[in-house]
Image: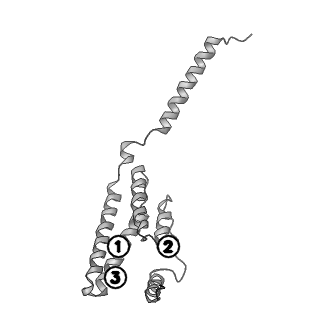
Amino acid sequence: MSRINRRALLLNAGSAVIASTVAATALATEPRRRDRELSRDLRALIKAHKAAYAALGKAIHEMDGGNRDHDRASRAEERALLAVCGYPAVREGDRRAKARYLLKIEARGELDLAEHMQALLRSTMRNGYRPKPPHGFGKAARDRARSAAVEAPSSG
């Protein structure tokens, strides 16, 4: 005959319930405070992009300096945005802040280059996989595409 009685069964079942509840609570808790905060690195990248974006807006409004200032500001803004896209957000706070910021950029229609998506996807990989682009894809191809878009007649 088994030595397990109702009292032993209830005691063991109660322990199992408490242990599983504690384990589930531990897994479902919020990340540590340090992980919820935005890192200094990402904060600096976002700040740099905001400054570059403001400089680009200023260059567009002040076209009296010619296209050189506009082009320089555009390239600086693009590099700053690519840096934000390519930042490997490991902490919970960084992931949330990066996603929120890039969703705002995307809502303005400015997260539209293939390089943006590539940088985002690479940032999720541990070693930042960076294959060489196929021949014909790069800065020159981007510039040709932009020139074609500017020269194309608008419908409407």
> Residue at label 3?
71
Along the viewing direction, whichever of 118 and 70 lies nearer the viewer: 70
Above/below status of 4 relative to 58 = above
Kind of element beneath mark 3: helix
Along the viewing direction, whichever of 18 and 153 lies nearer the viewer: 153
* Crowd tier of the residue under label 1, counting other residues whose Cα lies within 10 Å: few below 14, some 14–19, many 20 or above: many
Q: What x and y, as percent, mark residue 41?
A: 34, 58
Along the viewing direction, whichever of 132 and 88 lies nearer the viewer: 88
* Crowd tier of the residue under label 3, counting other residues whose Cα lies within 10 Å: few below 14, some 14–19, many 20 or above: some
> Residue at label 2?
114
* Crowd tier of the residue under label 2, counting other residues whose Cα lies within 10 Å: few below 14, some 14–19, many 20 or above: few
> Residue at label 1?
77
Q: Residue at x 25, y 82 (%)?
A: 62
Mark nearer the N terminus (2 vs 1): 1
> Cα distance, mark 2 to mark 3?
19 Å
Kind of residue indicated by mark 2: Ala
Q: Residue at x 46, y 86 (%)?
A: 154
Residue 148's disc is: none
Q: What x and y, as percent, mark residue 47?
A: 30, 63
> Cα distance, mark 1 to mark 3?
10 Å
Kind of element beneath mark 2: helix
Kind of residue indicated by mark 1: Glu
Above/below status of 58 relative to 129 = below
Q: What x and y, as percent, mark residue 75?
A: 36, 77
